[in-house]
Image (cartoon, rainbow, N blue to C red):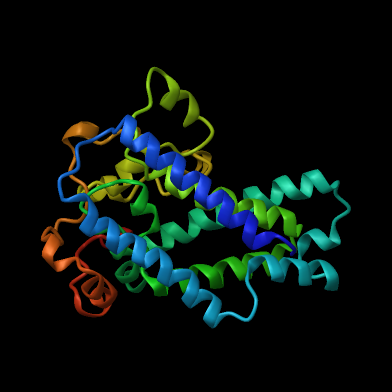
Amino acid sequence: MQGEIATRLVGFALAFAGMAVWERLAARRRLSTPRWPRRAVNLTIMLINPLLVRLLFPVLAVTLAVEARRNGWGLFNHLDWPYAAEWITAVVLLDLAIYLQHVMFHAVPLLWRLHLVHHTDLDYDLTTGLRFHPLEAVLSMVVKLGVVAALGPPPAAVVAFEVILNAMALFNHGNVRMFGRADALLRLLVVTPDMHRVHHSVVIRETNSNFGFNLSAWDRLFGTYRDRPARGHDGMTIGLAGFRDPRRLSLPRLLALPFVADPGPQPINRH
């Protein structure tokens, strides 16, 4: 789809810059570790993942959506719905798929080995939303391609979803303060930083909650919603109990972590 890459890059750049400024002006928590060593790791992972995905996959989600439309594949190509209804439904269903995928990365021990890289970050800021093991990025693309093939959504809806997902990953991992009732009102619709931060708590029952990235409704609907951490946002500890030494969280160690580390009792079905 023409202009897809440029649209996504511009959306990401604007979201990243906006969140970086917000964090600078109104930080929610004091960071517990030096900022730049961990940020350098997270930003390097951000560069590795899309390169690996593009190397491994001949088509990505938007291209597959175009082919699905052209060949009549998927649910929406067999429904006579208005374009706007298809567009909105596709974005919502793609978001549901990401929620369910996230739950499975906590519930299946083998998948948790990959996902724990995201949770080993000892602080919480916008770069945490970029910290995913490359193999998790690959599996996520497999899931996304499967959902797109099954739905046959409008390609423009897939582009919009990709832009929204990237921006929201930066937003809800932001170390930002929201004033007044802004958080309470906004989380009625979308996942806010204070809502998702609970998911990065070292306390297992809190880690296994608030799985959503975009819409907050899924956690409420499926009973995984938790309003706040037991010790409060200022008193909570970020990360995993078994991974507290920053010296053991360098980039090479993180890439090897799923294959060599004891993943601990984190997955849902072992708690």
Residue most toward the right? 80
Name the residue located 25 percent from the left edge and 70 percent from the top edge: 251
Q: Nearer the viewer, residue 72 or 39?
A: 39
Q: Residue 197's image quarter?
A: top left
Residue most toward the top? 180
Q: Is residue 259 left or right of residue 176?
A: left
Q: Nearer the viewer, residue 166 or 238?
A: 166
Q: Nearer the viewer, residue 109 or 19?
A: 19
Instruction: Inspect this view and state whether residue 74 appears.
Output: yes
| x and y percentages locating residue 183 in the rendered image | 42, 27
| x and y percentages locating residue 50 in the rendered image | 49, 69
Q: Residue 143's image quarter?
A: bottom right
Name the residue located 48 percent from the left edge and 24 percent from the top edge: 185
Task: Check the image and report above or below for 231 versus 103.
Answer: above
Q: Quadrant of the C terminus?
A: bottom left
Q: Nearer the viewer, residue 93 or 66?
A: 66
Looking at the rendered structure, the number of numbered marks drawn on it comes to: 0
Name the residue located 68 percent from the left edge and 65 percent from the top edge: 62
| x and y percentages locating residue 180 in the rendered image | 38, 17
Q: Is residue 99 left or right of residue 69?
A: left
Instruction: Inspect this view and state whether residue 212 appears.
Output: no
| x and y percentages locating residue 258 in the rendered image | 27, 75
Name the residue located 83 percent from the left edge and 62 percent from the top edge: 77
Q: Quadrant of the N terminus?
A: bottom right
Q: Residue 232's image quarter?
A: top left
Q: Is residue 123 left or right of residue 128?
A: left
Task: Check the image and report above or below for 191 versus 253.
Answer: above
Task: Check the image and report above or below for 51 versus 10.
Answer: below
